[in-house]
Image: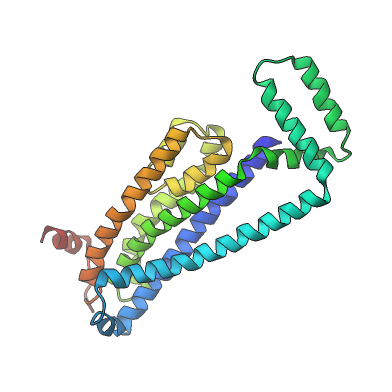
């Protein structure tokens, strides 16, 4: 039915953003650690500022991810168009049923609509395929894809800058767990709470997870197929866009201090002292 298709679309895109942030953010962190371990960063920083070096790595890897997703969207669109051209009657009947269901919510003759819907369903042999196509037609894919790219872009930039700062604080990957754990908790928590969000997509928990910048890239993309008030979408995007430069500023401060420190176990107390100075 409609609910299953919306659930599948939302969960799939939410998981893609979750894995992309971890994968590309991990690549940024690994790249920073490799530059620090090889001492090549000392040579590079003779020509560029620490902030420029950090953002160059973040933006470069982010563009690679965007290119991959654009290719996936194009290939998916071509595949969907091919299915639509090969089965035009199926999509016409699905559009007819979708229009009837929209009209039914406005208080018109229910009996006439039920008869018309039944006739439309009987005109297609494969009712399971009709249900699938009707569910796809009911989803606003242009809006969904647009929101996916917005939340992926700013969600990645927010987290990748912090991952870069974590990479500048450690000499080995195993030492970075104390710094990466606080970054992963909001993302993992959002994934674990997706089943609760399915029961109440517009509930209080879902709304707050969709607004908080550290959880909104996953939660809001998951909710959009179910329908989200435009006010919540705008507020969520604005807060995420505002959080990105703030987190980048914090990350740049940490990166600038930590990238040239070798052989020292850095603690949170050290980081706080940097900001006090």
Image spot of residue 27 (x, y percent) = 43, 70
* Apparent side of residue 201 relative to residue 207 in the rendered image (left or right): right
Q: Looking at this view, is 262 or 107 the one in front?
A: 107
Q: Looking at this view, is 215 or 196 the one in front?
A: 215
Image spot of residue 237 (x, y percent) = 41, 44
Examine the image and state in which quarter residue 26 appears. Answer: bottom left
Instruction: Reply above or below: 75 against 124.
Output: below
* Apparent side of residue 206 relative to residue 181 in the rendered image (left or right): right
Image spot of residue 227 (x, y percent) = 55, 35
How does the figure colour the protein chain or chains?
rainbow
Residue drawn at 51 percent across, 45 percent down: 221
* Apparent side of residue 127 relative to residue 14 in the rendered image (left or right): right
Q: State the quadrant of the C terminus.
A: bottom left
Residue drawn at 84 percent across, 41 percent down: 89
Examine the image and state in which quarter residue 42 appears. Answer: bottom left
Tell me if residue 120 can be seen: yes
Tell me if residue 167 can be seen: no
Image spot of residue 256 (x, y percent) = 22, 70
* Apparent side of residue 161 relative to residue 10 in the rendered image (left or right): left
Instruction: Reply above or below: 189 against 20.
Output: above
Residue drawn at 12 percent across, 58 percent down: 276
Q: Looking at this view, is 179 or 53 the one in front?
A: 53
Q: Residue furthest left?
A: 277
Residue drawn at 37 percent across, 72 percent down: 173
Q: State the quadrant of the N terminus.
A: top right
Instruction: Reply above or below: 74 against 171.
Output: above
């Amino acid at each position: 039915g409609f609910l299953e298709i919306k659930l599948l679309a939302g969960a799939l895109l939410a998981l893609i953003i979750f894995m992309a942030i971890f994968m590309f953010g991990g690549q940024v962190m690994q790249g920073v650690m490799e530059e620090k371990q090889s001492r090549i960063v000392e040579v590079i920083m003779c020509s560029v500022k620490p902030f420029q070096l950090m953002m160059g790595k973040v933006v470069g890897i982010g563009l690679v991810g965007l290119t991959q997703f654009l290719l996936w969207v194009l290939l998916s669109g071509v595949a969907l168009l091919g299915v639509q051209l090969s089965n035009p009657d199926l999509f016409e009947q699905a559009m007819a049923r979708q229009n009837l269901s929209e009209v039914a919510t406005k208080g018109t003759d229910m009996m006439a609509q039920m008869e018309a819907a039944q006739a439309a369903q009987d005109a297609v042999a494969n009712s399971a395929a009709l249900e699938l196509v009707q569910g796809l037609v009911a989803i606003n894919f242009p809006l969904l894809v647009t929101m996916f790219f917005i939340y992926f872009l700013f969600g990645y930039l927010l987290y990748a800058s912090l991952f870069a700062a974590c990479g500048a604080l450690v000499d080995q990957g195993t030492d970075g767990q104390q710094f990466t754990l606080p970054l992963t908790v909001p993302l993992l928590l959002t994934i674990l709470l997706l089943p609760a969000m399915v029961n109440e997509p517009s509930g209080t928990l879902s709304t707050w997870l969709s607004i908080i910048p550290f959880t909104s890239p996953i939660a809001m993309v998951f909710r959009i197929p179910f329908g989200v008030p435009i006010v919540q979408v705008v507020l969520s995007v604005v807060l995420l866009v505002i959080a990105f430069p703030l987190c980048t500023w914090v990350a740049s401060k940490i990166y600038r201090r930590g990238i040239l420190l070798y052989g020292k176990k850095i603690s949170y107390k050290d980081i706080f002292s940097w900001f006090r100075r």
